[in-house]
Amino acid sequence: MNFHVITLFPESLESYLNSSIVKRAQEDGKIGIKYYNPRDFAVPGKEGEEMTYAERRVDDRPYGGGPGMVVEALPVIRAIEGALKGTEKRKTKIIFFSPSGEQFTNRVADKWKKYSDIILVCGRYEGIDARVKKAFPMIDISVGPFTLTGGELPAMIVIDSVTRRIPGVLGDLLSIEEERVASPDVYTRPEVIEYNGKKYKVPKVLLEGNHKKIEEWKRGRIDKNI
């Protein structure tokens, strides 16, 4: 699977996506991550001339008034065109992040693992010119009932969540938490720790080896402190 990220700030994603499980998935050839900066798709100056800052600008004031700036449509459209090159239409999904979009869930992530290419359009400032969504079929997605500075954090959430569902990325399918009975409370060695003169112990039920009781404890049917 290839993830194509349309973003003005690719460096804001790279440190997270180039570490841990997602990094290993890239190294193993399970996924690929490519970045497309709309600034690189702004209308160029004369051939052979370096573009000025003004020519690389991709935002402008909103029609109808209001605060902030809006990202122009054409640089984003060209970036999406670049991402679509070489992809198969029926196996490609284009995602537009919006607070009013469909709620992203584990179930959605599981459905998306079947695609070969996912294009993630990250907004900034007061948003992206709405004509981008008219130029390409895409779906609006929200990662929660709150507003963020840009779409980069939601893009990382989607990439992480979908990647861990791709066969072979996790060594054990049970590592996908929702596929097993899991408690929000977990423990490891040592059995007893001491802090500020008080001892904190691992619940006794987890030490007895009674798997039926352990499963009941995980489901919350047994007192968590036992």
Image (cartoon, rainbow, N blue to C red):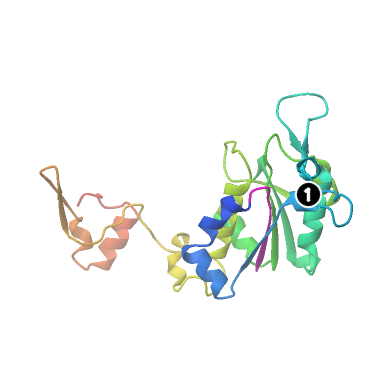
Name the residue tied to disc 1.
Answer: 76
**Is residue 7 within the magenta segment?**
yes
Q: Is residue 209 above or below residue 61?
A: below
Number of numbered markers: 1
Mark 1 neighbour class, 10 Å CA radius: few under 14, some 14 to 19, many 20 or more: many
Q: What residue appears at the point 35 percent right and 55 percent down from the top-left corner?
A: 183
Q: Position of residue 46 (x, y in %)?
A: 89, 52
Q: Position of residue 11 (x, y in %)?
A: 59, 53
Q: Position of residue 68 (x, y in %)?
A: 70, 29
Q: Which residues are magenta?
A: 1-9
Q: What residue appears at the point 84 percent right and 53 percent down from the top-left corner?
A: 49
Residue most extreme to the left: 197
Q: Nearer the viewer, residue 102 or 37?
A: 37
**Is residue 54 within the magenta segment?**
no
Q: Is residue 76 above or below residue 23?
A: above
Tell me if I can see residue 118 in this picture.
Answer: yes
Q: Position of residue 194 (x, y in %)?
A: 14, 50
Q: What residue appears at the point 82 percent right and 51 percent down from the top-left corner?
A: 77
